[in-house]
Image: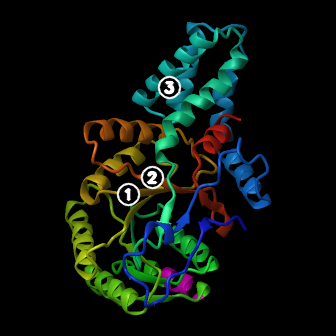
């Protein structure tokens, strides 16, 4: 199994709640391919599944490069392919402008030379989204997870719990999705499967469950508290306000918390995924994303749209924290959730 942790230095129940950054365990993306040519077998297998999931998009993009020369017609075809891949108008224009600059500087005339340049352009755009998830800066590290129904939120929490537990981190789950009995039951199954504690209350107030879980995590010396919140659409304003309330109440239980606010996104939703990121970030100030279901019909280009939006917003608001893409998933199996690496994704999309 490919380890999510670069290192894990467990903290005991008596450890300080303000562990130094050096002592923090880090869930990190794999090093770039150029630095580590040989990947662990499981990582290689996962990359193969990612490439297979994005095959339709990759074929539409690379088929454009089969012409005899680089001209405006080729760029127009590439523009169409990027738009069809859910990159969106703004990100498509950005990538084409960058690509034309690279082609001009290199003096390339063969369309086949465009592919590595497009990979480089996409990698540069996505790079700010690649950031390790730190575990251990505070004890417990409190991670609040949101997302719309059907995005794979609870399943992703279960997978993340499994990986954390395997690496030796003590985890406490908070079943704050109290409106949907199936979600609570699903999370309880993951808790039992991974032999981790869970705070659950049938029909209880989500904010109260979250408060109790964080308090219990502190009292029991847990490394991580994962809070599963109810799925909702960003247009459901009263429910979005409830998410804000959960976040405020978590902070009352622990002034440092939540350390992370993650949004789980279904990779099949296209440009709607960007709309979700904007809405949830406005409400919760997101710190990270989990992109699921990048298999089958998922096109993958929406990550470029998210990256460009993040770049422009960070320029306008320098103090704003760009939400990282911590994990991407390509299926339902435990091993199908892995860390995001910009160049790896760009290569999978265009291979």
Residue in the foreground of this view, choosing between 258 and 88: 258
Numbered circle sitting on residue 287:
1
Q: Which image quadrant is residue 253 in? A: bottom left
Mark 3: few/some/many CA within 10 Å (<14, 14-19, 20+):
many
Q: Quadrant of residue 16?
A: bottom left
User: Callout 1: helix, strand or loop?
Assistant: loop
Question: Between 86 and 217, which is closer to the camera in this rendering?
Answer: 217
Q: Looking at the image, do the residues carrying marks 3 and 1 touch, with CB atoms under 8 Å apart? A: no
In contact (CB < 8 Å): disc 1 and disc 2: yes
Q: Earlier in the sequence, mark 1 or mark 2?
A: 1
Q: Quadrant of residue 89?
A: top left
Quarter of the rendering occupied by the C terminus: top right
Q: Is residue 155 left or right of residue 178?
A: right
**Against 81, is 70 above or below?**
above
The magenta stretch spans which residues? 186-192
How far apart are the two marked residues, 3 and 1, measured between alpha carbons? 25 Å
x, y percent for residue 99: 55, 20
Q: Which mark is residue 95?
A: 3
Real-space CA distance between mark 2 and mark 3, rounded to the nearest whole angstrom: 20 Å
The reply to whether residue 317 is in sight is yes
User: Quick check: can you spot residue 24?
Assistant: no
Q: Residues within 10 Å of mark 1 (few under 14, many from 20)?
A: many
Q: Is residue 147 left or right of residue 126?
A: left
Q: Which label is found at residue 324?
A: 2
Mark closest to the chain's N terminus, 2 or 3: 3
Q: Residue at x 67, y 11 (%)?
A: 108
């Amino acid at each position: 199994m490919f380890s999510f942790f670069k290192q894990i230095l467990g903290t005991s129940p008596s450890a300080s709640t303000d562990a130094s950054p050096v002592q923090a365990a880090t869930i990190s993306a794999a090093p770039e391919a150029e630095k580590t040519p040989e990947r662990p077998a499981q990582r290689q297998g996962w990359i193969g599944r990612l490439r297979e999931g994005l095959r339709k998009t990759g074929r539409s993009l690379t088929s454009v490069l089969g012409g005899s020369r680089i001209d405006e017609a080729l760029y127009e075809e590439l523009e169409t392919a990027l738009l069809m891949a859910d990159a969106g108008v703004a990100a498509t224009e950005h990538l084409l402008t960058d690509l034309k600059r690279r082609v001009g500087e290199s003096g390339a005339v063969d369309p086949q030379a465009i592919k590595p340049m497009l990979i480089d352009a996409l990698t540069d755009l996505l790079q700010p989204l690649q950031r390790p998830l730190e575990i251990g800066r505070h004890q417990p590290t409190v991670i609040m997870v949101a997302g719309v129904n059907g995005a794979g939120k609870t399943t992703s929490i279960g997978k993340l719990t499994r990986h954390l537990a395997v690496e030796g981190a003590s985890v406490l789950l908070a079943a704050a999705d109290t409106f949907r009995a199936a979600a609570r039951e699903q999370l309880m199954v993951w808790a039992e499967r991974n032999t981790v504690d869970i705070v659950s209350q049938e029909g209880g107030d989500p904010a109260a469950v979250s408060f109790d879980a964080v308090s219990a995590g502190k009292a029991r010396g847990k490394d991580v508290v994962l809070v599963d919140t109810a799925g909702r659409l960003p247009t459901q304003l009263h429910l979005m306000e409830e998410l804000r309330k959960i976040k405020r109440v978590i902070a009352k239980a622990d002034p440092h918390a939540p350390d992370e606010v993650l949004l789980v996104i279904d990779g099949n939703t296209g440009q709607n995924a960007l709309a979700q990121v904007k809405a949830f970030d406005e409400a919760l100030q997101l710190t990270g994303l989990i992109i699921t279901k990048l298999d089958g019909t998922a096109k993958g280009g929406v990550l470029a749209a998210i990256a460009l939006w993040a770049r422009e917003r960070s320029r306008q608001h320098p103090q704003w924290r760009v939400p990282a893409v911590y994990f991407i998933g390509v299926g339902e199996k435990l091993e199908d959730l892995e860390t995001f690496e910009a160049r790896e994704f760009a290569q999978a999309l265009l291979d």
